[in-house]
Image: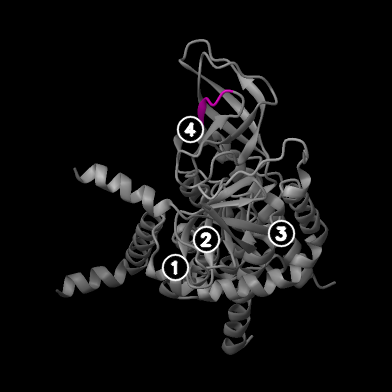
Amino acid sequence: MTTSKVVFNNFLRFFLLILIQVLILNNIYLGGFINPYFYVYFILLLPYEIPGGLLLLLSFLVGAGVDIFTNTIGLNTSACLAMGYARPHIIRLISSGPDSLIGDSPSLKNQGLKWFLYYSISLILIHHFVLFYLEAFRFTEFFKTFIRIALSSMFTLLLVLISEYLFYPKEK
Amino acid sequence: MRNLLVFLRKHYFILLFLLLEAVSLILFFNFNEFQNTAMYGISSTFTGAIYRTFRNISEYFSLRKTNQTLVEEMARLHSRLPDAYYKSDAYSFYRNDTVYQLQYRYISAKVISNSTDKRNNFLMISKGSLQGVRNHMGVIIGNRIVGQVVSVSPHFSWIISMLNKDSKISGKFKKNNQLVNVEWPGGNYRYGSVKEVPKHVRIQEGDTIITSGNSDIFPEGILIGTISEFTVVPDENFNYGTILFSTDFNSLGYVEIVVDLMRKEKEDLKATFKSE
């Protein structure tokens, strides 16, 4: 893929995912304990070769984009930054070497289910941990918040996997 | 100086991360004070327009519910018209009621964004300072409680919902006027908690809790909910209860903002007392 196409795809994904998050997912009520934050898919799908500074800046922007809609300035931003910071470390940790990374950006098709699960679960958990504990910010609700994190992460992961299978199907 | 540059280049990733994280945390903790910040005014013009476009489409799906609310409200108002009262010919008399002055006025507004599943929920409505909405005004639907205005721009307002960890409503039992605080502990949006119920107050399931009118935000007698569960704590001075909210926060289409015309008078009175 050419660089301009990668930039265009990510640009489009940026706005689309923010709109899906604030207009649809934030309005669906799932029992009070499940809040999927599917927009983190944007950070998951950024190219491997992205410079560190740009990665952090884009994480900041996507978090702030959601925050201005939900009147929670800084909440999603902090969570996304933590996720963006952890991303290169996680990739290094779970890959056997730079040669094992196929294609421009992480995908289930190229890396296989196991790698992709490790990758997305750990990053989604980091994001949700920061977000939910900052949001509650009370020690008395420690376990309740913990349950919310577990359930919401599962739901976010489910949405990520569904879109991986939908938009990047395996070639037969 | 050279060493510093080398250091910066080597560790720029973590340094940039710490800097940005610090910025966003500072913003998070300062913005949570519910002040009308300049940033809000700029962003809400943009986000409000997007929410409104989406809401214009999605409101068709809740027309049935909106209708039902309006019909209920109309029935309530009809029952207060002079025609609804029994008129006795034999003992008719005229009572001059000009001493009763109008205290509350209501502004109706459309809800253009709402949530019930976060720990801290907010609503955005389509009326702002140009229509007379001001900070700290109460928000109700029918005669049920919704929340409080926390931020106003010319065309939109943010409302902190009852479903927020910073919402603490002063309520009272309808039957005996005992004051209690109502909060939302998170989780299910239908249930809140009633704290600090004195030991001597007898509570039964189904007891109605209404606003106390002590807070200058809501008029007295706005419905908060009914007691659904009650716990007696043997070793403490207070008991706790669970309250089923009268408001269905998940289906708010239109709300009313309470304008207290005597608020300034009340505030001035308080101010003179403080300054002396």
Q: CA distance from mark 1 to mark 2?
A: 10 Å
Q: Which residue is mark 1?
A: B40
Label 3 – label 4 distance at C-alpha: 30 Å
Q: Position of residue A167 (x, y in %)?
A: 75, 72
Estimate the x, y position of residue B207 in percent, counting from the top left: 66, 26
Label 4, residues with CA under 10 Å away: few <14, some 14-19, many ≥20 = few
Colour approach in the figure? one colour
**What element does badge 1 sit on?**
helix
Q: Are marks 4 and 2 on the same chain?
A: no
Question: Which stretch is magenta?
Answer: B176-180
Outermost residue toward the left in this view: B1
Amino acid type, callout 3: Leu
Tell us which disc is closer to us: 1 or 2.
2
Measured Cα–Cα span from mark 4 to mark 2: 28 Å
Residue labelled with disc 4: A140
Q: Nearer the viewer, residue B39 or B244?
A: B244
Disc 1 from disc 4: Cα separation: 31 Å
Chain under numbered label 3: A
- The quarter of the image holding the C terminus of chain B is top left
Q: Secondary structure at mark 2?
A: strand
Q: Is residue A51 above or below residue B173?
A: below
Please name the residue that numbered disc 3 is placed on: A159
Label 2 belongs to which residue? Answer: B158
Q: Nearer the viewer, mark 1 or mark 4?
A: 1
Instruction: Check whether the beta carbons of the residues at disc 2 and disc 3 lie within 8 A of each other.
Output: no
Look at the image and tell me in which quarter the N terminus of chain B lies. bottom left
